[in-house]
Image (cartoon, coloured by chain):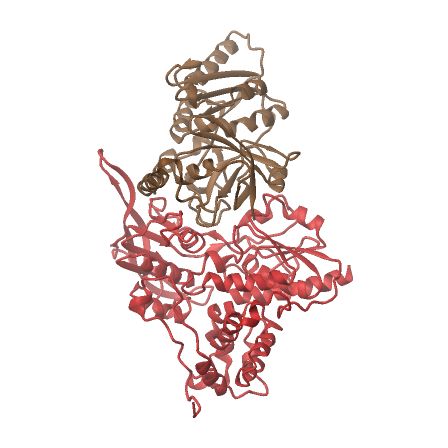
Chain colours: A brown, B red
Amino acid sequence: MSYKIVEKEEVATDTFKMVFEAPDIAAAAKAGQFLIVRIDERGERIPLTIADFSSDENTVTTVIQALGKSTKKLTKMNVGGSISDIAGPLGTPADVKQLGTVVLVGGGVGIAPIYPQISAYKNAGNRVVSIIGARNKDLLFWEERVKDASDEYFVATDDGSKGHHGFVTEVLKNILDEEKEKIENKTLENPKIKRVVVIGPPILMKVATQMMNEYPDVEIIVSMNTMMVDGTGMCGGCRLIVDGKVKFSCVDGPEFDGRLVDFNTVMNRLTIYKREEIERAEKYKKECEGGVCSTLD
Amino acid sequence: MTGKAKTRVEMPEQPEYIRRNNFEEVALGYTEELALMEAERCIQCRRPKCVEGCPVSVDIPGFIKLITEKKWTESLEKIYETNFLPAICGRVCPQETQCEELCILNRKENAIAIGRLERYVADRYYESPESLNEKGRLLSKREKPTGKKIAVVGSGPAGLTAAATLSRMGHSVVIYESLHKPGGVLTYGIPSFRLPKEIIKREVDEIKYMGVEIKLNYVIGRIKTLEELSESYDAVFIGSGAGLPNFMGIEGESLNGVYSANEFLTRVNLMQAWDEEYDTIIRKGKNVVVVGGGNVAMDAARSALRLGADNVTVVYRRSDTELPARREEIEHAKKEGVQFRFLTNPTKIIGDYGDEKVRKYDVKSIECIEMELGEEDSSGRRRPIPIPGTEFEIEADVVIIAIGTSPNPLIFNETPDLEKTKWGTVVVNDDLKCTKENVFAGGDIVTGAATVISAMGAGKKAAESIDEYLKNK
């Protein structure tokens, strides 16, 4: 099997939008789901969130941060090239329904999976407020399309190079506190915020969930990006503790009620191959010295 | 070569001290001479008991007679009448509890080595020039096209057999496989030192030559639902297996270095993590503990050894005689240096969390308790009971949980009229028909984890039921 790359664009520093031709996956994909991708025979299977999909154009879109060997190798490929395998759509789709106002928060590469949720929640009759953030403005991407799709839009950068100087959680807090005030003064015009969805690095999701303790009537949904191999529920490598029970992120998730997730276990389990991954990335970098990769076949 | 062999001809094997360090096949296969010697021992019973023990009813005396006549291609054709995967079956079937157990010569433990002969016939053909001919495949004869289309979920032994049987009957078949390679448990579960990948590829290719289409990377329950398949095909066969790993639910099971046997074996077998050239990583423990006593536990233990472990210990809650794994594989494991601790059950897994400078989250050891056998339980086996106060620790940096698997629930997604049991298996009648109109099922999805050959038997039976169903529709 072979899946062609039909579009490729560097959208932020070391961050690439890649669009694959995959008609049956595109027809079935829903917001909140992901793909498992394998470049070639020796490649590993890696999970990538679905950032967009079009059944008219038969394509699925991912946004990939080139960090380790596999993501670097993948993002070096160009339009016209193809990879050997894409399995998808995987995971339980986002639980989209009419709630009122929903706040979607995307941190770093988390901006990508947040994007399809905007139109999904809007189509379900919600008012959508989007907050996107990154360490600096060069790591931000898709600002225009997120802004256009949302009812309200905020941006934050850790270094203040764009938007709010600080974390997305601070922006979220301001929005929730402002709403609280308006409710007290009986000046709230928009539908009440019922749910917050946060997608980004585990530490962001953990901190955001802790912050939500002050707003017990608002749901907090997170998307758990654990280690994965098959992505279909047959290995248990993606297991995490939710409400004291073992769940598989690839089948029961990837979205969960943040208040029930044991984030520490997730973050600890993500370190299992850290040493090997760093060694491998170094080795790959050496092999690619001079701009020509000796491993490309 | 004169004189008849009086006892079973031994299977040549790699010596233990060499094979424990490589993933190449342990059993080297008969030579022509050894095969003839063994085949000549068969007394060609007029009422062969061995055939009754075969889940797909191979004409055993038939193919063995053709060996003695050196009619190699005809012998394979005879096997192909009922068995589409002879090179696989010859290697992994538990013949000692099936055909060979019933062999009349077994009274003196000299049963004909039926499996080894089946393997020889299949291997010999594939290594011969005739097999390279693209046209005129041995399996190409099919009935006239019926115009009926059938979807098969899963390309494991049940799905492959159902597809091949239906294809031979003239139906058009498409297999939907969730992984990126076909074979199911043959590919991800069974290590290459028992079943080389090239063997699987050969036998799957033969089935594809019959006209069966295999769509890889299709997870039914996600990309398409069973409901959709049921609507767009004339019939559906579910052979999705029992791939959901069971965990013990003990403390420490989420520590880094604790693997389900499925994950461990998938990384090693499907993703070839043992090979440095492949990108998938695996934690190669120095002290590995495997919990469980079935074939999967043996496969995991022997794989861990080959990855370079200093100590591999299998922890099993009952005793040696009760181990459910094939005796042949238990003996192989012992000879290769796998240690066994019987009447032992884990109570918790202990972690090394490092200190303030270097934080860790790794397995350090596994605490176990000694067991004794009490009264018989509902399965007829004596129930293991923990002996209080006998807790002890085994040092471990990798723990593999091989206590069994259950059916993957994804197949039931959005298909409410497909009834399942409380164990998650699919409800079927005697004809392997499900509660949903044109859907049939067989193999581990019905029985829970069992053998390759019983799955094949179910695939064949279901195909016959589907054929009957389509005729009467």
Q: Position of residue B470 (x, y in %)?
A: 74, 60
Q: Splitting the image into 4 quarters, where does residue B16 fall?
A: bottom left
**Residue A268 location in percent, x, y?**
34, 38
B408 or B29: nearer the viewer? B29
Image quadrant in which you'd find residue A3: top right
Q: Is residue A184 left or right of residue A274?
A: right
Q: Position of residue B132 (x, y in %)?
A: 56, 67
Q: Nearer the viewer, residue B73 or B292?
A: B73
The outermost residue toward the bottom is B3
Q: Is residue A243 visible?
A: no
User: Quick one: quadrant of the C terminus of chain B?
Assistant: bottom right
Quadrant containing the N terminus of chain B in the rendered view: bottom left
* Front in this rendered view, residue B243 or B70: B70
Does A269 sit above or below residue B312?
A: above
**Could you tell me which residue is drawn at 33 percent across and 48 percent down?**
B257
Can residue A256 be seen in the rendering of this structure?
yes
Please state the total of marks drawn on the protein image: 0
* Residue lying at 55% horizontally and 10% vertically, measured from the top left: A188
Query: On screen, B165 above or below A231?
Result: below
Query: Which percent across, then down, holds residue A234?
Result: 48, 50
Does residue B96 lie above or below A158 as drawn? below
Residue located at (44% from left, 14% from top): A163
Q: Nearer the viewer, residue A280 or A215?
A: A280
B82 displayed left or right of B279: right
- Quadrant position of residue B333: bottom left
